[in-house]
Image: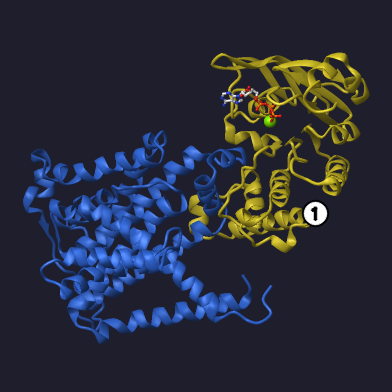
Chain colours: A yellow, B blue
Amino acid sequence: MSAEGTPLLSVRNVSIRFGGIVALDGVSFDVAAGTIAGLIGPNGAGKTTLFNCLSRLYRPTGGAILFEGMPILATPRHRIAALGLGRTFQNLALFRSMSVLDNVRIGAHCRMRQGFLAHALALPAVRREEEAARAAAAELVALLDLQPVADVPVAALPFGTQKRVELARALVTRPKLLLLDEPAGGLNHEEVDQLRSLIRDIRDRIGVTVLLVEHHMSLVMSVSDKVVALNFGRVIADGPPAAVQADPDVVRAYLGTEAA
Amino acid sequence: MDMTDRTWRRIGLAALLALACLLPFLVSSYRTFQLTSALSYAIALLGLNILTGYNGQISLGHGAFYAIGAYVAAILMDRFGVPYWATLPAAGAVCLVIGFLFGLPALRLEGLYLALATFALALATPQILKYKLLEDWTGGVQGIVILKPDPPFGLPLDQDQWLYFFTLVVAIVMFWLGRNLLAGRIGRALVAIRDHPIAAETMGVDTAFYKATTFGVSALYTGVAGALGAIVIQFVAPDSFTLFLSITLLVGIVVGGLASISGALWGALFIQFVPNVADHISKAAPWAIYGLFLIAFMYLMPTGIAGFLRTLAARLTRRPSRR
Ligand SMILES: Nc1ncnc2c1ncn2[C@@H]1O[C@H](COP(=O)(O)OP(=O)(O)OP(=O)(O)O)[C@@H](O)[C@H]1O
Ligand SMILES: [Mg+2]
């Protein structure tokens, strides 16, 4: 879509079905590097399913996904993070018994190299790598105001705080593209405002491209450079926020559900 | 964790070590023998705890790896004249490979299904050891008798004391390696897989490789422990390695404390000495008494002995202005 060549993410004609349900039906859209893209749609439209295809948790029945121009549908799941595709989960997927700091440090796993033997023998390389991971994690813990709870097991924290831990964990992987699945879920008005500026900072200061799934319309419309709307697994609109918001198909899709 | 916690831990560790070095001079040689056996159990329990406590893979069959380690040691000493200390790396290596290979198909099995597969392993072990075609090596039902090693360098120790110190050093090395393994990236990945395998994989953890390797490492620990056990008891026979041993190891990690390194030591002392205590209390129904002890421990220390001690230490060292 942009003139500078290949988009960072290119979803091409992706389809997936679960039994009789066609959850994604020939979905195609691009996300250009350096942008914030919104992905909207009523409940059950297929937004999370698309994220799960991107992080290889689901295998699409058809289509292709290109990241930096490279097809990723044959890449093993555990290599996705190292490629630069980070994500958060709609319903939280934290490591419950671990502290906030350890959860965030797991994010650095994909950037670390030392294996079983090196760790067992406590080689100097291990100490250096661990120190770097601790520093990187501490930086994001600070950025997301998690310092006061850094040593607390995540399971003991409120939902909103846990969402921030997930965000920190995803950022430590040093993603090029960050997939956010309903980060505003369960947040109050003030927290949504903070989230808005946080998402902008992530793009502007850390230089991470963002694909944002949200039901919070004013948030999506105010931060996104472009918005893709899904309904029943199909793309029904793709364009600038204002145009998508005014699109008759989008208005119809949201009638009777949330206000568009 | 702040400095004072660490200092306390150091002091505790030093005291424990001093006690461990004194004990064989204070107790009878039979007790020394029992303590040596407990140390070998502690190594096995650390191995099982890495697998089950940290990584969340249940094994009802670790007695099989203990048996393999024991037989590797016995056969190497008996048939090939290998010195006793050199059998430990061999036992560990054999179990690492077998554990890894067993861990690969076990990847498809979750929770109770994995428990069943390992249960089958435990059931089959004594019978495989009695198998006619292996008799030349294993000694069949008779087993293998091995000689007790003498202390080297003219050390002023009797055989039991020497074996105790030998086992103590091996245990310290194995615990040091285990602590290192669990302290960083690898340890976090193991717990992450236990807590949320999908999220772990999304964060870049190769769960298949980690689970199989952890199975191998766990088997290695248990195999080394089995080799030590054989040397200490001077005898291996198929019926020492029944399902009961596997269950006992599982009891050890739960009583000692799941996902705790020190828990392996406490659990080992429990499985070594509580049956004796029970036997003293009632010759007629020792296992009923053992059962009561188990229930009481689990009731009073639901997070195991290690968890109980941690809570206790936190209470004792709590300072007024704690963050
Ligand atoms: N693993 C699965 N098995 C069966 N059906 C599934 C599975 N995952 C998703 N679906 C179905 O696919 C459809 C799309 O679900 P998805 O979770 O992607 O919606 P969504 O757009 O994220 O909705 P929401 O806004 O409520 O989060 C739904 O009908 C859902 O029931
Ligand atoms: Mg969803």
Q: Is residue B122 left or right of residue B183?
A: left
Give how far across and how far down residue A56 sits, in percent.
Answer: 61, 28
- Residue A1 in view of the camera: no
Q: Residue at x 39, y 63 (%)?
A: B174
- Looking at the rendered structure, the secondary structure element under dot 1 is helix
The quadrant of the picture showing ligand 1 is top right
The outermost residue toward the right is A242
Quarter of the figure with residue B160: bottom left
Q: Residue at x 39, y 83 (%)?
A: B18
- Residue A238 in view of the camera: yes
The outermost residue toward the bottom is B26
Q: Chain of mark 1?
A: A
Q: Is residue B120 left or right of residue A56?
A: left
Give how far across and how far down residue A70 sits, in percent.
Answer: 70, 23
Quarter of the figure with residue B265: bottom left
Give how far across and how far down residue A138 sits, in percent.
Answer: 72, 58
- Front-most of B13 and A62? A62
Q: For disc 1, does the CB lie below 8 Å from ligand 2?
A: no
Q: Residue at x 83, y 14 (%)?
A: A249
Quadrant in which the C terminus of chain A is drawn: top right
The local crowd at label 1, few if under 14, some if 14 to 19, many if 20 or more residues have their Cα within 10 Å, is: few
Quadrant in which the N terminus of chain A is drawn: top right
Give how far across and how far down residue A125 sits, in percent.
Answer: 60, 56
Q: Amino acid at mark 1?
A: Leu
- Which residue is denoted by mark 1 in the rendering? A143
Query: Above or below — where is B207 with respect to B237?
Result: above
Q: Is residue A53 left or right of residue A185?
A: left
